[in-house]
Image (cartoon, grey):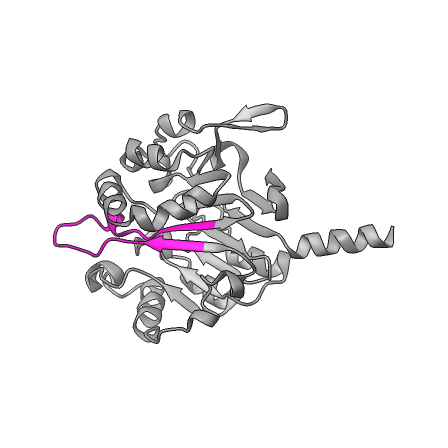
Amino acid sequence: MENFKKYLEQREKRKMMFTLWDIGHGLAIWIKTPNGHNHWIDAGKNNDTDFCPAEHVKTEYGETALDYLIISHPDSDHIHNLPSVIHNLGEPRVLLRNKTVPDTDKYGNGESEYQKVFKDLDTRYTSSITEEKSPKNPAYNGGVFIENAYLNYKEGMKINDTSIVILYLYAGWLFICPGDIEEKGWKELWQMYSKRFQPILDKSKYRILVAPHHGRSSGYCSDMIDAISPHWILISDKYGKEPTDQRFREKGIGLRYKDNTAKFFSTKSGGRMQFCIYEGSRFSFNQT
């Protein structure tokens, strides 16, 4: 019994946790690596309920440090909760953002607190980091393989298409987070960076796609679906207010879950989605 208890304790320590928060319009993802590092993708907040994911992570999980903050693109629904993220979890050790986006798009009029916080981070985080202490280094982050790419801004380009596309792979499970990238942006990005992404896709056994642009039609791209071949698609959409494209509900390959084969999961019906990935490709999944 004691040995089994120790086994369970060690098993818990070696898991990666991926949480997609139900925040309505916007995006917020928390990833906890097997060695306890906290990664955060985008900083959205539910304006209807005032639910703050970062405060929840601090109060319910006891987390108070942020190792890696990724801002896919600086639209307000992806950064307007930055002040609370910093207040609850502290400033990130490493910040990833698309530096080529014009200041007018990054900071807006500079009057809102979240714009001021983002500008402060964006202008201060200019030092490079060593490979040894990089959050993308599997030897440093507990065995998670991470890859990312983005398009440099060009005149007339949609800000959505400057989104950072980031992939997380652990124990055969691959999570693809493409921000709000749209079809034109994805096609150009894939043409430029498919050789960077393909090896990590090839290593995966199961692929989970977070639907770009909250599952809207503007985010649907058949080339993306063909390239990724996702088993499940996670849709962060807002009940009654988000025009979800039905194709995101149909195009998943499907995996058996609770005696049924599921192709997608939506925050409209299930709320927060949380995966726990263990060594050997074992997993648990719940929605609350």
Q: Please report the residue visible at 34 percent of the width from the left and 29 percent of the height from the top.
A: 245
Indicate whether 24 appears above or below 16: above
Residue 253 within the magenta-colored segment of the rendering = no
Q: Is residue 96 left or right of residue 275?
A: left
x, y percentage for residue 58?
Answer: 58, 61
Indicate whether 93 appears above or below 209: below
Q: Please report the residue visible at 55 percent of the width from the left and 63 percent of the height from the top.
A: 37
Residue 95's image quarter? bottom left
Q: Please report the residue visible at 47 percent of the width from the left and 44 percent of the height from the top.
A: 203
x, y percentage for residue 76?
Answer: 32, 54
Which part of the image, by quadrant, shows the C terminus?
Answer: top right
Q: Please report the residue visible at 40 percent of the width from the left and 33 percent of the height from the top.
A: 229
Residue 153 within the magenta-colored segment of the rendering = yes
Q: Which residues are magenta?
A: 146-168
x, y percentage for residue 230?
Answer: 43, 34
x, y percentage for residue 143?
Answer: 54, 57
Most extreme residue toward the right, as rendered?
A: 1
Q: Does residue 72 show up?
A: no
Most extreme residue toward the left, as rendered?
A: 155
Q: Is residue 229 left or right of residue 126?
A: right
Indicate whether 130 appears above or below 188: below
